[in-house]
Image (cartoon, helix red, strand yellow):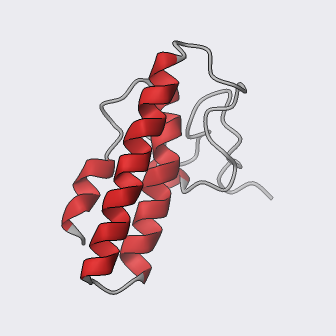
Amino acid sequence: MNRLMKYFDYSHLPGKLQAVSLLFFELATHIDTTIPESAEKTVGLRKLLEAKDCIVRAALDTGSELNGDVYFRPECLYKYCPEYRPGSNPCGPKCLHPQENQS
């Protein structure tokens, strides 16, 4: 795991900011697990981290009003969502994740 991955953690953020940060965490995780370690990978992750910080601050500046009313997009890796519990709707009532074991 790349040393920068720890900075993509979002568990300390309030709910809607977690949703914003989660998107960057997912992308960083995908990059980290699929691209071999190199100086360029680290630079790319650092730039992604800078972008994430800017977007989280932009979302923070908007107060509690973010565009849309959905916490997480359906295709996100819901196992990383802070409210995830097996067999339940992982992110609460506004989450678009499919229910587990749903036919």
- Residue extending furthest toward the left: 3
Give percent across and percent down for residue 47: 37, 58
Q: How many marks?
A: 0
Q: Is residue 85 visible?
A: no
Give percent across and percent down for residue 25: 43, 53
The image shows residue 79, relative to residue 82, as above or below, that is below
Quarter containing the N terminus: bottom left
- Residue extending furthest toward the bottom: 36
Q: Residue at x 59, y 29 (%)?
A: 92
Task: State the image quarter where residue 21 is shown.
Answer: top left
**In the rendered view, does 71 fall on the left or right side of 38?**
right
Q: Residue at x 54, y 17 (%)?
A: 62
The image shows residue 17, relative to residue 50, as above or below, that is above
Give percent across and percent down for residue 78: 54, 51
Most foreground residue, 79 or 56: 56
The image shows residue 53, relative to residue 65, as above or below, that is below
**In the rendered view, does 47 fall on the left or right side of 63?**
left
Q: Is residue 8 visible?
A: yes
Task: State the image quarter where residue 56 is shown.
Answer: top left
Most foreground residue, 89 or 21: 21
Quarter containing the C terminus: bottom right
- Residue extending furthest toward the right: 103
Q: Residue at x 47, y 52 (%)?
A: 24
Most foreground residue, 86 or 94: 94
